[in-house]
Image: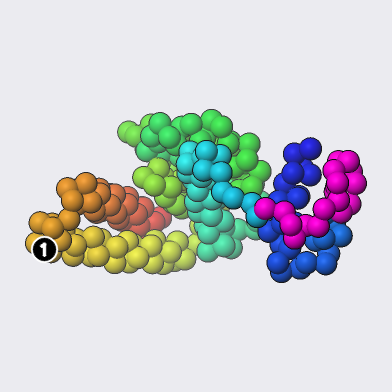
Amino acid sequence: ATLLKVLNEILTLLHPIIPFITEEIYGQCCALTGKDSESLMTQAYPEIENDLISTEAEEEVQWLQTFILGIRQIRGEMNIPPSKPLPCFVQNINDSDQHCLNTHSQVLNSLAKLENISQLNANDEAPESATALVGEMKVLIPLAGLIDKEQEAARLNKEIEKLNKQRAQFAGKLNNEKFVSGAPEAVVNKEKEKLASVENSIADLSTQLEKIAKL
């Protein structure tokens, strides 16, 4: 029943673009459900049901996408085969990160092709690693046997350059007296948080760059 409901709504959405085939499929769906086979063009267009929208689910999917993309970028830039399972460490974990790790570890292991995901405390010394960021959480892929020193240094420098541009943008806003005095306090505080987050990320990546230089 759920599949037919979803299919019927998809057919209704597509009907203005491909009317004939959607009308045919809709008629077959009506036959399956025993519903009178009215023309699809007479059906009400689907409306958004705001109570079914889950902000938490959207944020978790975004978190998963960022995590998996970070691993895949490391693979691509370091020429690591997509099929090669990798060990992974995570550090600087907040409550939201912990929830996502607990809930979606199997998805991460499967889609990012990881051997395992090990957690490090904030004060633990991490192995020399390629680093991706998910918010302020660090995703670490150990470099032993994987790293091309020059490529990894170039990747980190490129990421730092991008973050420096963001930092200049946020700092420019906060140094603009007209913006600071005219914008709501919540907006100004949000820009300050963005600036602090970017500066923390730059510091983390700079530390990784120093480690690479010592290899």
The quadrant in which the C terminus is found is bottom left
Q: Position of residue 80 (x, y in %)?
A: 60, 58
Q: Is residue 145 above or below residue 79?
A: above
Quadrant (top left/top right/bottom left/bottom right) for the N terminus = top right
Seen at 83% across and 67% down, the residue is: 20
Q: Is residue 5 magenta?
A: no
- Furthest residue toward bottom: 17
- At label 1, counting other C-alpha atoms closer than 10 Å, the crowd grade (few under 14, some 14-19, many 20 or more) is few
Choose between 102 and 176: the one closer to the eye: 176
Whole-percent x and y of residue 32? 89, 43
Q: Secondary structure at mark 1?
A: helix
Which stretch did the figure color magenta? Answer: 27-44
Q: Quadrant of residue 92?
A: top left
Position of residue 5 in the picture relative to residue 147 (left or right): right
x and y, in percent, of residue 143 in the image: 49, 51
Percent x, y of residue 186 = 21, 46
Q: Nearer the viewer, residue 204 or 51?
A: 51
Residue 132 seen in the current view? yes
Please name the amino acid that badge 1 sits on: Lys
Q: Residue at x 10, y 56 (%)?
A: 181
Instruction: Tell me the residue at 59%/42% (across/down).
Output: 108
Q: Quadrant of residue 159?
A: bottom left
In the depicted view, which residue is nearer to us: 180 or 98?
Answer: 180
Does the segment drawn in magenta span residue 37? Answer: yes
Q: Which residue is the site of mark 1?
A: 178
